[in-house]
Image: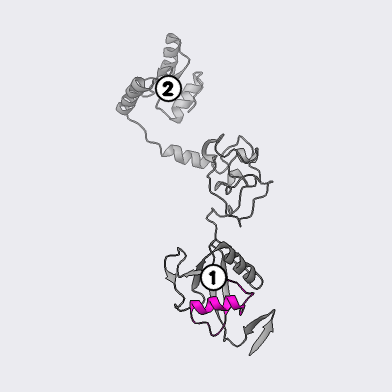
Amino acid sequence: YFVRNNTRETVINGFMSTVDLGLPDGSIFAAVETPANCATIGQWKSSLENGTCCDKVLYARRLSCYRDDKRCDLLDDSAKLPRSPAKIHIEGPDSVIRVLVLALNKHYTAKPPSVEAAPGREYACASRQCKFMVNSKAECGGYCCIPCSVKDGTHCDVDERGSYRCERRLAPSHVIRADSSWKPPGEKFAHMTLTHKDLLREEGAWPILTRAQKEDYADRIRTQAPLPGLYVDYDVETAKQIQDKFRSKKQEYGWSFDCRPDFFCEAAYEGFFPCG
């Protein structure tokens, strides 16, 4: 039997089937009811124009229906109407799409399109002038990059800092904007997810150069890009001998390929300030 409900008829005992509708913006209306006598795409469009299952959608016949979300497999009016959970993917004039959405919103809730983002990062930048998604790195807080957290969001082409530059991923219109209170630790800040164990693991993976390799690289650097100061090799000289060489040549700077804890300690003991 039929029950009249808000000017539309709903079939109670399973006589009415449903179809899932995919809209151009990627949102989906699931389980939209269709009249029992709708067997083809053309009949379904006619039911929209007549207001059988929702408010009237004038010119619904101008809608194009596709079997796939890439809109390649067109369903003509004589094609069989798919049933849930199969989807009809719709294209058409903006005016007709808007009327269809208004009519469906009175009875159904659209599922917004999915957002490609890291877990917990499905937000638009908190800066009201910015059009990008928040950075995939949590250290940027609710912003697309660090400068955006201290400026007006119009900077994203300039003034970027290191690995935290804007990823320039446009935020879809339906995405919620992040809270402006989600500030990063500061304009100048450290990578908060990097631990001491991580540093030791990365340093442990560094290859140790042989003496011949070090000499080869040192010769290339001297030829192509001279560095200031003296070149030192801890496999050849002790830290004390290196100190004596610096004093005799009156040099303040030097460089080496020896990224070793024992060399750093010995150099520091002799009065050097090792840095890498």
Residue 197 lies left or right of residue 217; in this view the side is: right
In the displayed orientation, state which residue is furthest to the bottom. Answer: 1
Report the mark closest to the observer, 1 or 2: 1
Please say if 83 is above or below 227.
Answer: below
Based on the picture, tell me whether residue 79 belongs to the magenta stretch.
no
Based on the picture, tell me whether residue 36 belongs to the magenta stretch.
yes
Q: Which residues are magenta?
A: 33-59
**Number of dots carrying numbers:** 2
For image coordinates 50% across by 42% down, the residue present is: 198
Label drawn at residue 255: 2
Which x, y percent locates residue 47?
57, 78
Residue 82 visible from this viewpoint: no
171 or 54: nearer the eye? 54
| Label 1 CA crowd tier, 10 Å (few <14, some 14–19, many 20+) | many
Label drawn at residue 154: none
For image coordinates 62% across by 74% down, the residue present is: 56
Please say if 257 is above or below 119.
Answer: above
Q: Amino acid at mark 2?
A: Trp
Which x, y percent locates residue 201?
46, 41
Q: Rounded to the nearest whole Å, what is the CA distance between mark 1 and mark 2?
A: 66 Å
Residue 99 lies left or right of residue 261; in this view the side is: right
Q: Amino acid at mark 1?
A: Leu
Looking at the rendered structure, the secondary structure element under dot 2 is: strand
Q: What residue did someone put label 1 on?
A: 21
